[in-house]
Amino acid sequence: MNTAVQLEQQLMSIHRKSYPAYKSLAGSWQFPGFILHIDHVQGDPFAAPSKVSVEVSQKTAAFPEELFDRKDKRIALQDHLTREFSRQVSEYMFQAKGSGKSGLISISRCGQEVLERTALEMNDKRILVRFEVGFPANGRTINAPELKKILFDYVPQCVKRALYYRNLNAKVLQEVADLAEDQTFIREELRKRELAAFVANGSVLPRQSGVSDKPMKGAVVFESPRSMEVELMLPHKGALKGMAVPRGITLIVGGGYHGKSTLLKALELGVYNHIKGDGREYVITDDTAMKIRAEDGRAVAHVDISPFINHLPNGKDTVDFSTEDASGSTSQAANVVEAVEAGAEALLIDEDTSATNFMVRDALMQSVIAREQEPITPFIEQARKLYEEKGVSVILVAGSSGAYFYIADKIIQMDTYRAYDITAQVKEICSRNKEEMEFVTAHRKESEGIARWGVMSRHPRLGKIDKKHGQIKVKQYGKDSFSIGKDTVELKYVEQITDSEQTTTLSYVLKNVIEEMETKKNASLEELAEKIWREIETRGLSCLVKGSYIPSSLAMTRKQEIYACLNRYRGFR
C-alpha cells in the first residue's frame, strides 16, 4: 500500500497544475494510525466535493467490545461517533482557503433520531468513516499546500479525537450503549404487554419551533394519567413509570393548542430511538406504526380500496383502483390499505390532516343523503374490524366529532399539555345517548360484510424509463422528493421520513427495484419490496450500491417507507 509520505510527494508534484491532476491522488494511503481512502475526486472546485474515507482498525481504536456487541448498541455507537466526528471537522471547515468548495469538510448531519448510516460503519475489525472534502484551488489551479493542511493536519486530528476510544469520554459512551439497550427493552415490553406505545413520565414532547426538532425549554413535562401508568424495570435506568397506550382504538381529544397533535407527533417519531437529551428518549411506539393522512393528487396503482369506497357513479373499479390524481378520500383509503399491506400494526391519524368524508358521517347527514347514494364507508365504521380481524390498532386525534367516542377503547384528554384518562366519564355519557350509540354500532355491524381487508397481489407494469448512458438517472430534492428518469416521487406526506438521507436511500431502493423488474417482469410489488428489504437487513445499506464506491449519504429507513415509496412511483402502470 502507498504511504502518507508518497501521498505528500505526489500532492506537491501537482501543485499549480490544472485541477483534473488531483485525480492522480485517488487510492489508499497508509497514515500513522489509519488508512486514508480518496474514493472519488471532484471534477473542478465548484463541483460536488471529493469523497474521502478513513479506516481505523479496532486494534488502534480500542473500543471495548461490550459497547457494540449487539446491533442496537452498535448503531447507537456509530451514531454517536458520527456526531463526534462532525463536531471535530466543523472546527476546520473552510480553514483551508481557495475558490468554490475549497476547504469544505463535511459528514452527515444527524438529527434527534438514531439512524444507521453509511457515513460511519463499525465492526469488530475496523471503523470506517466516509465524508466529503473540497479539494482547494486558486481558480481552477491546484493549491496543494492547502490540501496538505486538510489531509495531514486536520483529518488526523479529527480521527484521533473522534475515533480513538482513549480520547473520548468513556462514561458518555457507556451511557449511549445503555440507553440503546433500555430502548430495545421497552420495545420488547410493548409486544409482551400488548401495547401500541409507551410515553415515560418526565418526557419533553413539545419542540422548539416548526423548524427545530430540539426540545422546547420550559415546556410542561409529560405525566401519565394514574389509571394508564405502568412501571418498567429497565436493564440500566431501572424503574421507569409512564403511560401505556394499549392496543385497540385510542382517542386523543382536547381543546385546540392543548397538546393533542404534539403527543401524536411524538408517537409518530417513537418508531425511532432518540438521543439522550432529546426529551423523547423513552417515547417508544410500535416500530411498524404508520402515520396516515389524506394526500390529494397522489398516484394510486392497482389498490383494493373497496373496504372504504364502492359503487362509484362513474363505475370505476375500486377493487383494482388506479388513478393519477387521487382525491382526499381515495388517497386516504389507499394509504390505509397500503399500510396494512406493508405490515403496519398501528395507524396514527390526525383528524386535521384527514379527509372528513372518509373519516365519519353523522346521523343527520346519513338521514339526508341515503346510505345507498354514498359510495364511502367511513373509517369510523371499519376501525373496529381493522383491529379485531387484522390486529391493527388505531391512535386517533379528534376534536370535531363525538362519534369517535363510541368506538374508542381508551380516551385521553390533553389539557394544557397534561394527559387525563377520561374513558369512564365519556363512556357514561355515551351510554345515555343510546340513539346515537345504536346508530354508530348498527352501521358498524352493517359494514362488516363489506370490508375484506384483502390486499391484491399487485404485478405492476413498468413504463418507459428515461436513461442516460444506459444508467437510470436519480436526483434528490431534499427530504420531500426525488426524481428518477423523468418521474418525480413525492414523499412530503410520508411523514415518518425524518432525514434527507432516508430519502436518498429510498431513491436507491426504487432504482434497484426498477432494474430488478426489467429482468423479472412477473414479480409482484410485495415480492420486490420484501426481497430488497431482506437484502438490506442481511447485507446493510451497501447492498443498494453497484460498484466499490459506497456513498456517505444513505440512512436506514423502515420497510413501511419502502412500500410507501414504491406505491407513489408514477412509472408503475
Image (spheres, rainbow, N blue to C red):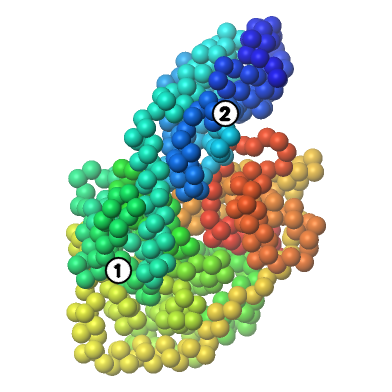
What kind of residue is marked 2? Ser
Q: Is residue 287 above or below residue 370?
A: above
Name the side, left or right, on which 176 lies relative to 118: left
The nearer-to-camera label among 2 and 1 is 2
- Please state which of residues 251 and 280 is positioned toward the viewer in this rendering: 280
Q: Is residue 445 above or below residue 304?
A: below
Name the side, left or right, on which 269 lies relative to 29: left
Residue 66 shows up from this direction: yes
Disc 1: which residue: 252
Q: Position of residue 280 (x, y in %)?
A: 32, 51
- The structure residue drawn at horizontal position 52% and vertical position 84%, both measured from the top left corner, is 451
Q: Position of residue 67 (x, y in %)?
A: 44, 40
- The structure residue drawn at horizontal position 33% and vertical position 68%, both measured from the top left corner, is 245
| Quadrant containing the C terminus in the rendered view | bottom right
Q: Is residue 178 above or below residue 103?
A: below
Disc 2: which residue: 57
- The structure residue drawn at horizontal position 57% and vertical position 22%, both measured from the top left corner, is 34
